[in-house]
């Protein structure tokens, strides 16, 4: 599908409804796009040794193969959400998939580390367009809130499956076909998702100012924060390489808040963000990713470095957890349709907190089966919490603002994930702690954070059966 075909699609009459058979295709396209960008965030890690060997890359170059994607992705999420509302989710989703497929091919053909890092940055920028646009497209394509809650659950399940499948797929593809295969595999699936979104009804753009001050401030703040957090582990918290971008990020946040509070057409409505529902959902998104990605990172290190497991065995050990996440995503969608988002969202976080308390009790030297058993409530809780969180947030805004709201939630989740990996990693590597004490402190911190957001959700989120469209 070409860019001109996307433009013609966006130019279709605004009153043209999507045919009923197309709705399922659009949902699958959104899920596939979300699956791909999550897969690409995790599939690369296992292939890094082979990339270093084939491209003669040093440790710094390999770090930027991962960080380049993360920086562009995190830095552009909020702005991409605003662009989605302005030009239409259908158009941005299609353009994002096209750019992601091209960047993936460029990664696969990269002759050296520099080209690979630049292509990874392009991948991250394209992924930032795909994520909020896919969620906004679900919001706009399904008028019935109950059907929308079900679709969001499937969408979330696709992302969870990708995160867990990444290390396993990366290990097998690298072993059989070489590291380039982990990027080439994205191309056919990206094109398939583009064919699916071609069947979507036109998204109606929201004619508004692009808010250049807010856009620029958001990009600087998110990029500076992410860069600083990434550099904490290798450089140390007191390094100028960490402190300077962190200071720039703080200044940019203050600039962003001023621009959004005084601007004529702000990208983000700060009054919305201060509402209990918004604040609770954003805090929950941050806490979920902080805890989940932090513990996955730590367990990967413990299994490989402490217990001598191979990357493939480590990835396979997480497959039972993946099954619980996927099943919980689907179950959560049904619960949300029946009783509303309040109790599934709060109860899921409480359950996940119990899992982290289990990790605290078992410790890093405990039996493997007990550690994996403690991961079960973490997986179930994480799977149960995401769909009602996204449903509650999207139901609180109009379809025309779904893009920027999705971008805001995604930015909070991305920030939580990056910070969780860094904090958990620092705790288990700290000289005064060691792996055993560091893991217990990290697990206890995650349990306290999730317990706090569970209480907040219970007090802030509205309860009741999701209304059905007339």
Image (cartoon, helix red, strand yellow):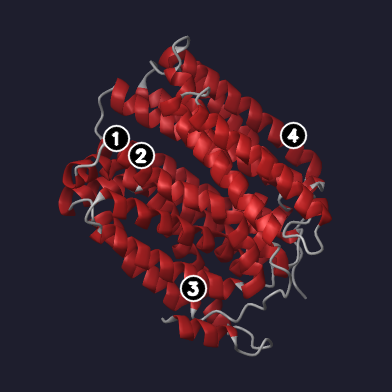
Residue at image coords 50%, 81%: 6
For the residues bearing labels 2 and 1, Cβ distance under 8 angstroms? yes
Between disc 4 and disc 2, the foreground one is: 2
Residue holding disc 4: 455
CA separation in Å, label 1 and label 4: 43 Å
The secondary element bearing badge 4 is classed as helix
Question: Quick check: 255 left or right of 2?
Answer: right
Q: Is residue 71 visible?
A: yes
Q: Nearer the viewer, residue 180 or 306?
A: 180
Residue holding disc 2: 63
Which of marks 2 and 4 precedes in the sequence?
Answer: 2
Residue holding disc 1: 59
CA separation in Å, label 3 and label 1: 35 Å
Q: Mark 3: few, some, or many residues within 10 Å (few <14, many ≥20)?
A: many
Query: Residue 349, located in which quarter of the rendered image?
Result: top right
CA separation in Å, label 2 and label 3: 30 Å
Between disc 1 and disc 4, the foreground one is: 1
Residue at image coords 65%, 90%: 13
Question: Quick check: 267 left or right of 118?
Answer: right
Which of marks 3 and 2 precedes in the sequence?
Answer: 2
* Quadrant of the frame with the N terminus: bottom left
The location of residue 175, given as percent across then percent down, is: 18, 47
Residue holding disc 3: 94
């Amino acid at each position: 599908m070409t860019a001109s075909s996307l433009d013609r699609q966006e130019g279709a009459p605004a009153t043209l409804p999507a045919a009923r058979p197309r709705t399922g295709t659009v949902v699958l396209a959104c899920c596939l796009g979300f699956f791909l960008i999550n897969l690409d965030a995790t599939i690369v890690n296992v292939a890094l040794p082979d990339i270093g060997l084939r491209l003669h890359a040093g440790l710094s170059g390999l770090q930027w193969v991962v960080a380049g994607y993360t920086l562009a992705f995190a830095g552009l999420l909020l702005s991409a959400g605003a662009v989605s509302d302005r030009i239409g989710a259908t158009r941005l989703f299609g353009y994002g998939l096209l750019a992601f497929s091209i960047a993936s091919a460029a990664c696969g053909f990269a002759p050296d580390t520099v080209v690979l890092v630049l292509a990874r940055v392009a991948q991250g920028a394209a992924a930032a367009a795909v994520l909020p646009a896919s969620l906004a497209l679900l919001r706009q394509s399904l008028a019935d809130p109950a059907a929308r809650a079900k679709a969001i659950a499937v969408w979330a399940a696709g992302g969870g499956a990708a995160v867990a499948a990444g290390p396993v797929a990366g290990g097998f593809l690298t072993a059989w076909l070489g590291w380039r295969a982990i990027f080439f595999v994205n191309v056919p699936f990206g094109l398939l998702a583009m064919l699916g979104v071609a069947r979507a009804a036109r998204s109606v753009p929201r004619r508004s100012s692009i808010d250049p001050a807010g856009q620029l401030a958001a990009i600087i703040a998110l990029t500076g924060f992410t860069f600083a957090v990434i550099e904490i582990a290798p450089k140390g918290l007191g390094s100028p390489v960490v402190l300077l971008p962190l200071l720039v990020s703080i200044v940019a946040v203050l600039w962003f808040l001023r621009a959004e509070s005084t601007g004529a057409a702000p990208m983000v409505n700060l009054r919305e963000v201060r509402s209990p529902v918004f604040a609770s959902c954003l805090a929950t998104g941050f806490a979920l990713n902080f805890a989940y990605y932090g513990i996955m990172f730590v367990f990967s290190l413990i299994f490989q470095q402490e217990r001598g497991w191979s990357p493939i065995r480590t990835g396979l050990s997480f497959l039972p957890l993946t099954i619980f996440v996927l099943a919980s995503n689907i179950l959560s969608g049904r619960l949300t349709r029946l009783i509303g988002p309040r109790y599934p969202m709060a109860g899921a976080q409480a359950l996940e907190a119990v899992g982290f308390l289990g990790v605290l009790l078992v410790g890093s030297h405990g039996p493997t089966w007990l550690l994996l058993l403690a991961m079960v409530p973490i997986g179930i809780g994480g799977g149960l919490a995401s769909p009602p969180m996204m449903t509650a947030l999207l139901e609180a805004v109009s379809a025309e603002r779904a893009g920027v709201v999705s971008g805001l939630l995604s930015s909070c989740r991305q920030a939580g994930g990056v910070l969780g990996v860094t904090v958990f990693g620092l705790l288990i590597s700290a000289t005064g702690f060691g792996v055993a004490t560091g893991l217990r402190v990290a697990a206890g911190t995650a349990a306290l954070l999730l317990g706090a957001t569970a209480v907040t959700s219970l007090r802030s989120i509205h309860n009741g059966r999701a209304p059905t469209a007339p």
